[in-house]
Amino acid sequence: MQVISSKDNEFIKHVKKLKDKKYRDMNQEFVIEGIKLIREAIEENADIKQIVICDNCLNSDVIPKELMYEIAKYECVYVTEKIFRTITDVNTPQGLLAIIGRNSTENEINYNQDIIVALDDIQDPGNLGTILRTVDSIGLNQILVSKGTADCYNPKVVRSTMGAIFRIKIIECDNLTTTLQEARNHQYKVIVTSLQTENSVYDIKYNKKVVVMGNEANGVSAEIQNLADEKIKIPMLGKTESLNASVATGIVLYEYVRQKIKNEF
């Protein structure tokens, strides 16, 4: 078994460069790290290019034996602990990461779903990852993201998804307004969150809707506000004026779940 011990190794350089968005986009690859995400990747038949294993994990119980059996089916690269610490993105690594290939055909929108979620310049990686996880939790398998939204394959976003990244088709829109207009041509109505309305999230039916969630600081852009068929807001009884973007998204989407369970549309 060969163990990489040099930081000048070309593969190690490649893994390090995948921390950069432009390099990730160019290679259509991203990095996942830790036992849970790698187990999820295997279960979801993700395009696993290589699995990197810290050599000191081989003689410990850190990685479960049944997972090691599954890992052995893939191309494995072994590195020293010193080298692993140069490529890890977490403070307390588990000694396991993988290079995942992105699906280059992730651009066709499925217009057969009740609702479609669209993100207009969401910036915080933690918010973005949690939103992807929420979308997965309600049974959807796609999301539209504007060009100004944070990179969905950023390591922090990937960790925050808790595996949902493998089940959600991420459709990156060069022009979100144009994409929303196309959705309207498929009989969808565009719904945006806004403080400039009296309509509550509980006042509309969530069938054939594109729900647009806006930027943490500025909300949905004026251009998309003008395009909207309906505007909604989350009613608040206290003095807080706004909610975290991922929390707000969860409230809106679980009203859709309530209506679906109750057969209200």
Image (cartoon, helix red, strand yellow):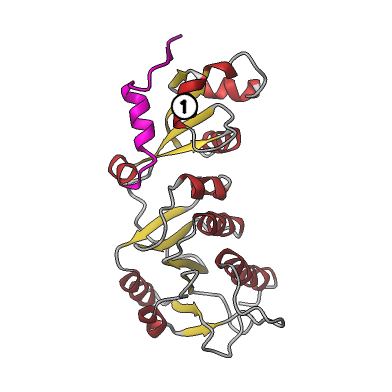
Return the residue at label 1.
Answer: 51
Q: Position of residue 157 (x, y in %)?
A: 50, 50
Q: Percent from the top left, x then y, of residue 106? A: 36, 52
> How many numbered circles are shown?
1
Q: Position of residue 122 (x, y in %)?
A: 46, 64
Q: Residues within 10 Å of mark 1 (few under 14, many from 20)?
A: many
Of the 4 image quadrants, the one containing the C terminus is: bottom right
Point out residue 206 in the picture as x, y percentages from the top left corner. 56, 75
Q: Is residue 114 left or right of residue 251?
A: left
**Callout 1 amino acid:** Ile
Q: Residue at x 65, y 17 (%)?
A: 60
Question: Between residues 154 and 117, which one lies in front from this camera angle?
Answer: 154
Q: Is residue 66 above or below residue 159?
A: above
Residue 13 in view, yes or no:
yes
Where is 14 relative to 187, above or below? above
As drawn, the residue found furthest toward the bottom would be 198
Residue farthest along the top direction in this orientation: 1
Give the residue drawn at x 63%, y 70%: 251
Q: What SS does tag 1 mark?
A: strand
User: Is residue 26 a member of the stretch shown in magenta?
Assistant: no
Q: Residue at x 33, y 31 (%)?
A: 14
Relative height, residue 70 to residue 31 (above, below): above
60, above or below 161, in the image:
above
Bounds of the magenta segment: 1-21
Instruction: Answer yes or no: is residue 73 visible.
Output: no
Would you identify the image quadrant in which residue 109 lies? bottom left
Q: Nearer the viewer, residue 144 or 30?
A: 30
Residue at (61, 56) in percent of width and height: 137
Q: Nearer the viewer, residue 44 or 224?
A: 224
